[in-house]
Amino acid sequence: MEKVRLVMAGVGRWGGDVLKNLVALEGCSVEKTFDPSEEGRARIRELAPQAVPADSFSELLEGRPDGVVIAAPAELHHPLAREALQKNLNVFVEKPLALNVAQGRELVRLAEERGVVLLVGHVLRYHPAMDAIRRAVREGKIGKVLTAHARRTNFGRVRSTENVVWSIAPHDIVNLAEIFGEWPVRVSCSGRADVRPGISDYALLSLEFPSGRLALAHVSWLDPQKKRELTVVGDRGMLLWEDAEGRLEFLPNWAEPSPDGSTAHHTGPAERLEMAPGEPLARELAHFAACCRGEEKPLSDGREGLAVLRVLAAADESASRGGVPVEVE
């Protein structure tokens, strides 16, 4: 089997992890790379000395590679992905797909018209814990899903273009949509910009789904605690995923009305759920390679990326209007 020939643009902090995984990916070859910064070029020399450095993104695309990996800053996702798609090349682009819905819609249209792969970097979709959560929900382990809430906080890098919702919340939006089996139709969002004017540093989101169910998400890059938590509440139990601790548990806890008008609370010992081995980023990139070979269909495709953009846009509008609920268009 011939190796999948890949090229990559953008080797910053996260991009370095992406490149490291690409180099280790069986059946793939990182042929060329591009990063305009000296820091990025130094990282390339360290991680992929065999890759030919390109002087521009256009040069990177020469030679018709099998796939283009874009891990550049978010404001470059749209122009770089558009240029690659216009050349009929398969594209993996980190989240968010773009910085507005119109840009995302254009990329989806291009990919579908050209018949090429557009895969969006919703990396937690490929996490073994999410596989286990999807399986538990599908098998009815917690009964009917009632609600869910996510917390994603850290003392992290403050962005200069996208706010904390656009930078961090896509992970939770995708996870919650998968768990509920539907996409939000209404969003309320409250946030505040304390470091950079106009760039919110923390936010609370309330997501309403077509079924009437609600989910909550708390995101912040101004928090002393690194938390990556997801709680799923059902009418016959709960799931608790603490990613930072590598722990996924089923708790047989639920509440229901009693015949006498009181509320009965059912509790039991927590059960640790097994997760398959494998790193989410490596699994995601292996999936992209398989898509480039025509062996698999994209899971986190352009349409999923566009659905996320629609929720983010509604969240921005809600925040600008004091947190009032806004319909997802």
Image (cartoon, rainbow, N blue to C red):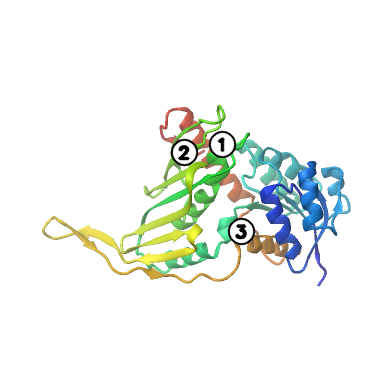
Find the residue positioned furthest to the left: 260
Q: Reading the chain from its start, which is encountered first: label 3 or label 1?
A: 1
**Residue lying at 31% horizontally and 60% vertically, measured from the top left:** 235
**Residue lying at 68% horizontally and 60% vertically, measured from the top left:** 285
Q: Which mark is residue 203?
A: 2
**Residue lying at 68% horizontally and 55% vertically, measured from the top left:** 17
Residue located beneath label 3 in the image: 299
**Residue lying at 30% horizontally and 63% vertically, measured from the top left:** 253
Disc 2 is placed on an element classified as strand
What's under tag 1, amino acid-wise? Answer: Asn
Q: Is residue 209 left or right of residue 42?
A: left
Marks 2 and 1 close (CB-CB < 8 Å) = yes
Which image quadrant is residue 19 in? bottom right
- What separation in Å lies between label 3 and label 1 (alpha carbons)? 26 Å
What's under tag 3, amino acid-wise? Answer: Leu
Q: For the residues carrying marks 3 and 1, which lies nearer the camera in this image?
A: 1
Mark 3 is surrounded, within 10 Å at the Cα level, by few (under 14), some (14 to 19) or many (20 or more) other residues, namely: some
Which image quadrant is residue 144 in? bottom left
- What separation in Å lies between label 2 and label 1 (alpha carbons)? 10 Å
What's under tag 2, amino acid-wise? Answer: Ala
Residue located beneath label 1 in the image: 163
